[in-house]
Amino acid sequence: MRQTYLKMAIDETQTADPEIGAFWNSGLDAKAGRMDERMLDRIPTEEAFLDTIAQRAEQEYQSYPNPGYVSKKGLPASAITAKFAANIKRAYEKFKANWQAMFENGAVKFKERVAGAVQRYLKGIAQRTLPLTGFKKLGLGPAAVAGFWITGENKIIRELRSGDTSEGGPYRICPVGVESDLRAALGQRLIKAGGAVLRSSLDDSTISAVNTEINQLVQRYVDPALGLESFVTGGASHVDFVKANKQLYLEIQVSRV
C-alpha cells in the first residue's frame, strides 16, 4: 500500500546567482598585488624555485611510472623520470617570465584568468548542480527536498514548486535518530548521480545505473520495524530519476508490504 509519493521536475534552465561572480571578481586589484607579493616572498630566486617546486615535483613524479614501464620510444621508467627532473630544473626562467607577464600592466592576464575561471564555474554549477540543489533565493532543489521528504520533515512541503506532484506528505523511513545521516548521504548521492545523468544527456543506461545505486543506499537506512517494501528502482518503494518527454524528474514512492 502506497504511503507517500513525490515527483519533482529537474529544472535545467536555472542560472547561477550573479552575486557569486561579483564576489569573486571584487577587489581583484588588491588580490593580484597580494598574490604577486606572496609568490615573490616564497620564490625570490632560482635556488628557492628548485627547493620549493622543482624538488617536490621530482619526488612526486618518481613514483608515477611503473618501474617496468617502457615507452614507445624504448625509454625505461628510470630514463623518463630522469628526463622530467632535468626539464623541471631548467624551468625557472620560463616560470619567472610567465608569472611576471600575468601581473604586468595592472595584472590584466591575472584578471582575465580569474574572470574565465568564474564563468566556467558558474556555467558548470548551473548545468550540473543547481538543477538538483537549488539555491537560497529560489529555494531548495530536489536533492535536498528528497532527504527531508523520506525522513518525515513536514516543513519541507513549503519548498515544493508549482509543477511538483505529491500524495501523502513526508514519511519517515528510517529509525529515529538517523534522519540527518540519511539526508546527508542521500543528498550527496543525488547530486552526484543527477549530475552524471545530466552530463549524459539523459542516457537510459546511465539513469538505470545511478537509480540502482541510489536505492541500495536508501535501503541501508530503512527501519525494518516499519514493514516497508524494499527500495529498488521501479519498485513499490523507490527513489528514482525518471525521464518523460525529454524532461528529467526525481520520483519518490514509499509503500508498505
Image (cartoon, rainbow, N blue to C red):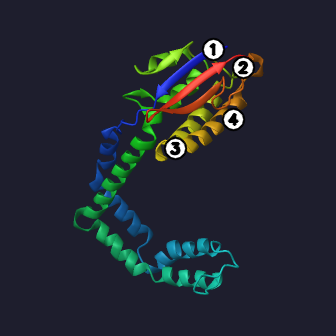
Mark 2 / mark 1, whichever is N-terminal: 1
Q: Which residue is mark 2?
A: 228
Disc 1 crowd, CA 10 A, few/some/many (<14, 14-19, 20+): some
Q: Look at discs 2 and 3 and give the one toward the viewer.
A: 3
Query: In this orientation, which residue lies closer to the viewer: 91 or 250?
Result: 250
Mark 2 / mark 4, whichever is N-terminal: 4
**Do the numbered discs 2 and 1 sit on residues whose CB atoms are within 8 Å?**
yes
Q: Which kind of residue does numbered mark 3 sit on?
A: Asp
**Do the numbered discs 2 and 3 sit on residues whose CB atoms are within 8 Å?**
no
**Do the numbered discs 1 and 4 sit on residues whose CB atoms are within 8 Å?**
no
Q: Which residue is mark 4?
A: 216
Disc 3 crowd, CA 10 A, few/some/many (<14, 14-19, 20+): few
Give the number of the disc on residue 3. Answer: 1
Position in image of residue 4 (x %, y %): 59, 16
Residue 187 appears left or right of 198: right
Query: In this orientation, which residue lies closer to the viewer: 230 or 184?
Result: 230
Q: CA distance from mark 1 to mark 4?
A: 20 Å
Q: Which residue is mark 3?
A: 203
Q: CA distance from mark 3 to mark 1?
A: 30 Å
Disc 2 crowd, CA 10 A, few/some/many (<14, 14-19, 20+): many
Q: Look at discs 3 and 1 and give the one toward the viewer.
A: 3
